[in-house]
């Protein structure tokens, strides 16, 4: 190559989707191909896992589909699902598709106003919820969502109710219904959680899911998820990433498990023993931090930190022409014997691959886990692209990038640096919102709102959000993501919002991780204290000062954080400062903490000159 950096990269498709294909047919094909092999494992109350073959799953799907028909769900009708991640959600998704319906996910943390908006905008007829509490939320929303005719509760036997209702629906009707949708027909409407304004409903087709999963498997399947591989789903199934994986396992001939309670995640990982893991960076950070604190509690913090450093150095050496030398290989082997093998065991002992998405992972963690033996392939995608547009590949993993476009996908960098996407996964548009659709889709290219660059191999690097660019009073453009991601990697830190628009310098709002705080205090020989006391403690402040300095190493002085303040209130879904997909509602934070931000700039001379 001539060394020029391209503004566009398209990866040719490796798999095709026929016009008449749909997601119900994807399950039928799995049964025809490997009907007796396991497809789903369901966690029982005693902690064991019940194995369901593909044929058994299909029988249950069709029985529930009959129940939907008996409840008056017509082809094209919307069926709402509001629940944590559990096997019944996957059952309902495929049952809805088999009945010719369109499932609409609702986050189980949604408020009555949010449920009312989504149910009315999508014209939802039947809602299946997990608990009585969810049912009460939907009941409160129903006056503003008159299309909702019935609410069924999983914990009150909703699945059995549906199966019983459908016993008289003939098989022929299900055969007819399951063949109605074509590849370009609507499969689901997923409402973006949105950091501002009302959620927009992204219309995703059967082709979006089938084409994207097939092409992803054509490129990654042989190494990452060959037939018989296993993955445990713990991300919210209301999120597009989890729905993508729910579909992916079917053509992959893989096995899927679900866990609704992330507090028992490590126990479930050890019991289920996945071969590949799908997650967001926050989970990888928490596993690392929890392991460090466990080692510290046993008086082995120094050993853990040396092993972690060796893991990172070893991984970085893998990217050099010479590779790790004999001495580094020996150090890595010792670190593995003392520490690293315990992390593999904590993840079930079989996981060799992970795919991370939703936010930047950070180079430190990526190198650490690769040194442990878990290759984390960082990827990128959005609701509007049916999850991944890009992912690193085993043959060439460039840590710090999100990899090249998947087969059948193209990425273009606009003149202003915005990332545009086109291809298999790009959505139809926003439901009932032609203005937003016209703004988002230009000549078939989706405007992601993210900023980035493409290297000579087509690998994309994300540099920030277009709408989140901060312009200081001095005219310096600053992308906050780099600073926020690095600072958030500290075990004490829960969330970070970098500020400084039209201000003399960059500042930051920091929240503490209340779950990690006790362990961190204990390992640093500090007394137990709550978040409020910790926010003022000199030892905590000194640790955060060092963390800020390390974050600043990644940027120029003009972009560096000069002052920060510790908030005693964390950002949560409940206080409406996080979206259900755990993204910070930046505009809401800036509005709510205006006075705190102003305080950062009271004595601007001292900070600007420090």
Image (cartoon, helix red, strand yellow):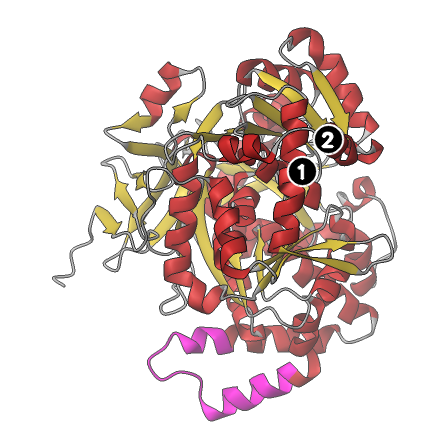
Question: Residue 150: where, in percent of width, then height?
Answer: 72, 18
Query: Foreground: 512 or 346?
Result: 346
Residue at the spot 64% in from the left edge and 15% down from the top edge: 116
In the drawing, does residue 295 fall left or right of residue 79? right
Q: Which residue is mark 1?
A: 63
- 304 in magenta: no
Is residue 392 visible to us here? Answer: no
Question: Residue 606: where, in percent of width, then height?
Answer: 54, 38
Residue at the spot 33% in from the left edge and 32% down from the top edge: 447
| Quadrant of the image occupied by residue 568 | top right
Is residue 455 visible to us here? Answer: yes
Residue at the spot 49% in from the left edge and 66% down from the top edge: 226
Query: Foreground: 547 or 332?
Result: 332
Main SS type for the magenta part?
helix
Query: Foreground: 250 or 509?
Result: 250
User: Decide: marks 2, 1 in contact (CB < 8 A)?
Assistant: yes
Question: Residue 98: where, in percent of width, then height?
Answer: 55, 36
Name the element at disc 1. Answer: helix
Real-space Cα separation, disc 2 to disc 1, in angstroms? 8 Å
Query: Foreground: 36 or 563?
Result: 36
Q: Which residue is mark 2?
A: 162
Image quarter (top left, top right, bottom left or bottom right) of the N terminus: bottom left
Name the element at disc 2. Answer: helix
- The stretch of residues the image draws in magenta is 314-336
The mark tally for this picture is 2
In the rendered image, the vertical position of residue 529 relative to residue 204, given as above or below: below
- 316 in magenta: yes
In the rendered image, the vertical position of residue 579 relative to residue 54, given as above or below: above
In the rendered image, the vertical position of residue 276 relative to residue 88, given as above or below: below
Q: Residues within 10 Å of mark 1 (few under 14, many from 20)?
A: many
Question: Residue 260: where, in percent of width, then height?
Answer: 73, 46
| Quadrant of the image occupied by residue 90 | top right
């Amino acid at each position: 190559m001539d060394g020029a950096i391209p503004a566009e990269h398209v990866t040719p498709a490796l798999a095709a989707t026929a016009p008449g294909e749909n997601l119900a047919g994807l399950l039928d094909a799995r049964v025809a191909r490997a009907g007796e092999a396991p497809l789903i494992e369901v966690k029982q109350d005693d902690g064991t896992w019940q194995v369901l073959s593909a044929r058994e799953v299909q029988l249950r799907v069709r029985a529930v589909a009959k129940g939907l028909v008996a409840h008056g769900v017509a082809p094209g009708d919307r069926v709402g699902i509001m629940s944590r991640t559990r096997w019944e959600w996957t059952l309902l998704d495929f049952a809805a598709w088999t009945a010719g319906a369109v499932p609409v996910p609702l986050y189980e943390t949604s408020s009555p106003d949010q449920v009312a908006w989504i149910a009315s905008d999508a014209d939802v007829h039947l809602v299946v919820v997990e608990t009585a509490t969810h049912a009460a939320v939907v009941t409160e929303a129903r006056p503003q969502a008159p299309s909702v005719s019935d609410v069924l509760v999983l914990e009150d036997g909703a699945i059995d109710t549906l199966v019983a209702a459908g016993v008289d629906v003939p098989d022929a009707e299900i055969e007819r219904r399951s063949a109605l949708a074509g590849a370009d027909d609507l499969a689901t409407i997923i409402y973006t959680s949105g950091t501002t304004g009302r959620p927009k409903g992204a219309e995703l087709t059967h082709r979006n899911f089938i084409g994207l999963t097939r092409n992803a498997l054509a490129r990654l399947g042989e190494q990452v998820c060959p037939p018989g591989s296993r993955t445990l789903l713990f991300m919210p199934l209301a999120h597009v990433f989890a729905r993508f994986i729910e579909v992916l396992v079917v053509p992959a001939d893989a096995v899927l498990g679900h866990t609704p309670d992330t507090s028992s995640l490590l126990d479930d990982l050890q019991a289920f023993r996945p071969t590949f893991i799908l997650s967001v960076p926050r989970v990888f950070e928490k596993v690392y931090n929890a392991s460090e604190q466990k080692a510290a509690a046993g008086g082995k913090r120094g050993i853990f930190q040396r092993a972690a450093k060796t893991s990172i150095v070893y991984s970085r050496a893998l990217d050099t022409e010479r590779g790790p030398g004999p001495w580094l290989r020996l150090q890595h082997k010792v670190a593995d014997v003392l520490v690293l093998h315990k992390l593999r065991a904590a993840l079930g002992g079989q996981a060799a691959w992970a795919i991370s998405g939703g936010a930047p992972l950070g180079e430190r963690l990526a190198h650490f886990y690769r040194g442990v033996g878990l290759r984390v392939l960082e990827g990128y995608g959005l609701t509007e692209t049916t999850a991944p547009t890009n992912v690193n590949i085993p043959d060439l993993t460039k840590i710090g990038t999100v990899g090249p476009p998947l087969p059948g996908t193209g990425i273009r960098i606009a003149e202003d640096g915005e990332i545009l996407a086109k291809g298999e996964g790009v959505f139809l548009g926003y439901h009932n919102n032609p203005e937003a659709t016209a703004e988002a889709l230009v000549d078939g290219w989706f405007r992601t709102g993210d900023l980035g660059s493409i290297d000579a191999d087509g690998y994309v690097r994300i540099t920030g959000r277009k709408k989140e660019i901060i312009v200081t009073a001095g005219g310096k453009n600053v992308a906050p993501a780099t600073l926020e991601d690095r600072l958030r990697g500290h075990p004490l830190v829960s969330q970070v919002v970098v500020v400084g628009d039209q201000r003399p310098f960059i500042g930051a709002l920091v929240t503490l991780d209340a779950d990690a705080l006790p362990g961190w205090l204990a390992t640093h020989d500090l007394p137990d204290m709550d978040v409020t006391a910790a926010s003022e403690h000199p030892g905590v402040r000194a640790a955060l000062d060092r963390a800020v300095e390390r974050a600043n190493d990644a940027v120029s002085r003009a972009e560096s954080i000069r002052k920060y303040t510790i908030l005693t209130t964390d950002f949560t879904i409940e206080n409406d400062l996080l979206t259900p997909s755990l993204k910070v509602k930046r505009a809401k934070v800036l509005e709510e903490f205006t006075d705190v931000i102003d305080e950062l700039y009271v004595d601007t001379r001292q900070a600007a000159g420090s």
